[in-house]
Image (cartoon, coloured by chain):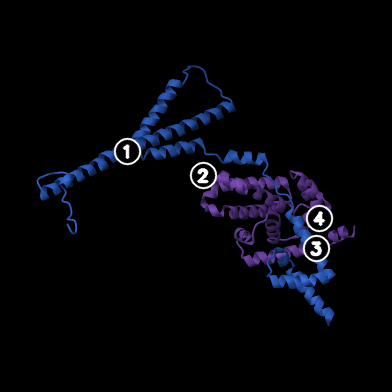
Amino acid sequence: MRMRRQDFEAAVASHGRRVFTLAVYLLADREEAEDVTQEVLVRLWRRGHEVSPGKIGSWLVRVTRNACIDAIRRRQDGSRIPIDEGGGTELLENAPGPDALAHASEIGKRVLQALETLSEPGRSIVILREIQGLSYREIGDALEISLDNVRVTLHRGRRRLREELREVYDDVAAC
Amino acid sequence: MSRRVDAERCAEVIESLDALIEGDLDDSEAAAMTAHIDVCAACQRERRLAEELVVELRSMPSFEIPERVMQAVHRVARPSVMRTFLSFFEGAFRRPLPAIAAVSAVLFLVVVMTPWKSNSVPEYSDQEVLRATDELRLAFAYVGDITRRAELRVKERVFEERVAEQTVRSIKRSFQIIGGVGTTATGPAATPTPAVKGS
């Protein structure tokens, strides 16, 4: 038993970009994100028929996040790739379109570095909310946590990012 | 005293900055916070930082799945010929006659169109194999279509013979019985008409 082909294609068209983007930001490594995305989509093909159509999006976010966490655990030293050594900078420079150039700025890199300092699930929640524009409810459904938990974790994440980036913004303001 | 009150107020404002930016506060709370921020340089800095951070995060790029990843996924995510084959035969058990006819037709076509060469072992390129696979898939789809149509015709005939004709016969018989009881005449024209009030 497999997912119907047209349902699979529709799910990929609707949510594929979100899956890959989440993997890119969680892993800060494009190649690893490609592997994870492939793994997630194959899993969607094999198991998607078990998920009700209205919940495919949140299921994909959950599976992607879990696959990213597994990928990070599988890394030899168990660490994340530091942004300064190619991860985030390369990831921004490789992004398609003029937006990517605008983001290859000092602040953009520092924001990515700051994201790296967040622990889970704060990091996923900030990415899903701020970069991917999901609602609190969508995030709660995807990560299987309450709305209050989403709100509180997001708030802590933003505060942490502000602390990390305070100097950068102060320098920019001083200029 | 005043400084301590201000510091407490600043802490409250900073704590609720996200809610203010998200628009989650009601009008009176938002107005009170804004009134404080307007006169507090530290809170103004904090709000600017919070807003700039949100703007920066929300303008981060999202990424399209690379073509090579989609190609790799599609290599796995395609209905196999075997599956199409099996699903056809699964249906064949439910409707054996049309299926036997369809399979016979396919076998006949295969036999007629196969070039019989005795001692040669053909070698096919990947492209030829892919093309053949696609053609086979198309053939199965065609056979499936024929089977479905045959099944519909059978259903129509069965319906006609077992339901429609019997119903018509039954109605006719009913009219005959009614006609026989009321008058000697038969058929719908002999059905007694109800008396009209006041006539």
Label 4: chain? A
Q: Which disc is residue A4 wearing?
A: 2
Indicate the position of residue B123 as horizontal and vertical percent values: 56, 23
Task: Name which residue type carries label 2.
Answer: Arg
What color is chain A drawn in?
A: purple
Label 1: chain? B
Which quadrant holds residue B33? bottom right
Dot 2 falls on a residue whose secondary structure is loop
Task: Mark yes or no: residue A116 visible.
Answer: no
Q: Is residue A42 shown left or right of residue B89?
A: right
Dot 1 falls on a residue whose secondary structure is helix
Indicate the position of residue B199 as horizontal and vertical percent values: 17, 57
Residue indicated by mark 3: B48
What residue is drawn where x is 79% and y is 59%?
B52
Mark 3 touches mark 1? (CB < 8 Å):
no
- 3D distance between C-alphas at marks 1 and 2: 30 Å
- 3D distance between C-alphas at marks 3 and 1: 74 Å
Task: Name which residue type carries label 4.
Answer: Arg
Residue indicated by mark 1: B156
Label 3: chain? B
Q: Nearer the viewer, residue B22 or A118?
A: B22
Above or below B146: residue B36: below
Indicate the position of residue B101 as horizontal and vertical percent values: 36, 30
Q: Nearer the viewer, mark 3 or mark 4?
A: 3
